Amino acid sequence: MDFNLTETQEMLKKVAADFVKAEVPAHQMTQWYKNKQTYQPRLVKKAAELGWLGMMLPEEYGGAGVSTMDCAVVFEELGRGPVPGPLFTSGILSAQMIFEAGTEDQRKTLLPTLCKGESIVVPAITDQAAYWGPQAVETRLSKTPSGYLMSGTKRFVFDAEAATSFLCAALTEEGKVVFALVDRNSRGVSITPHVGFFVSVAEVRFDKVVVSPDQLLGPSGASWATLEAALDKSLPILSAYQVGATQEVFDITCEYTRTRVVFGQPIGRFQRVQDHCVDISIHLDQARWATYETIWRIDSGMPARAAVHEAKAVASDGYYHGTNYAHMVWAGPGTDYSHPMMAHSVLAHTLYQYLGTPGHHKRLMMDALYPRAI
């Protein structure tokens, strides 16, 4: 494996780093997270202008046609912000789902506007909060003479408030999971932001929402397998974002241990503080190598299903536990919502369960490595 970046990737990394420094300064970012105002249209517009929305899509659909590694390099830097907003949910996951399963007309109609940031398509998948998998889809799609009616409640929709439309999973009367595009302004759609120790999350309710046949993704609504195919390409990008976020937590914490003086010496001289920094670095290294091995496998055309699940599990664990160890070093100052650690902490807790918990992905990793006879 060669993890050295190409000249193009180094350029992408620098552009993304400069973007974070200029557009997401720490004092402003902390206020967005404190006030749960994580959808900033200005950031989405600038990201679209830089070609970061749908960047892995072919150019004919408005994308940049870049490799998984090219995209990951950008999103790792965005994670250092951490840059908020639907850059992943709409620009990566929904874009991949539409590309994988949409009809040619849907691709040509939906993807260019998504890449320009003119439309924001947010996945609304499971109904059972933190649970993941087809068994967690409970929203119903009932047939009518002219189309369908959708009813159900998605309790944990990330970036819901930014959506212009939702890519919603629902159960047909035959018990099949299908996907439909639903305009957020449709009659019967309501969005209720969550409060608590997470961010960018809302409950989305569909109360007898009218869905026409042409709103189904693909010819017949696609299937859960379509989502899995899109996740194989998307989850490593989310993992790279979490790697960048964990790297930033590590960097600012280590710098704090050099500048914070107690009893006449920097706190970095104390053994227990050193232990916490080592713990963060271990989680960071695990997340980085698991993520980038996965991306190397994908770009090399090798089987990567097990590695994808491993990367999501390890990156989510790493960000979550890394912030916890960092809080032990920062102590009181790190619990102020005006401090960057609190933004990272609430985001780490949110992403821990987003698209499946680490435990869930570890089970899927083992299923991929050692398939069970049915």
Image (cartoon, rainbow, N blue to C red):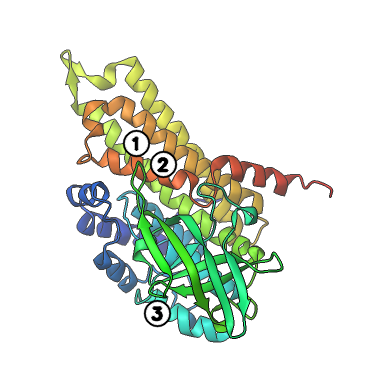
Residue identifier under label 3? 113
Residue appearing at x 36%, y 45% in the figure = 198
Of tags 2 and 1, which is closer to the observer? 2
Q: Is residue 317 left or right of residue 255?
A: right
Label 3 vs 1, first from the N-terminus: 3
Labelled disc at residue 30: none
Q: Is residue 367 above or below residue 268?
A: below
Q: Is residue 4 above or below residue 165?
A: above
Q: Amino acid at mark 1?
A: Phe
Residue appearing at x 37%, y 35% in the figure = 323
Label 2 Cα crowd, 10 Å radius (few <14 / some 14-19 / many 20+): many
In the image shown, does 68 or 339 lie closer to the viewer?
Answer: 339
Q: Is residue 312 left or right of residue 250?
A: right
Q: Amino acid at mark 3?
A: Thr
Q: Amino acid at mark 2?
A: His
Labelled disc at residue 349: 2
| Residue 289 in sight here | yes
Residue identifier under label 1? 250
In the image shown, does 241 or 257 lie closer to the viewer?
Answer: 241
Of tags 3 and 1, which is closer to the observer? 3
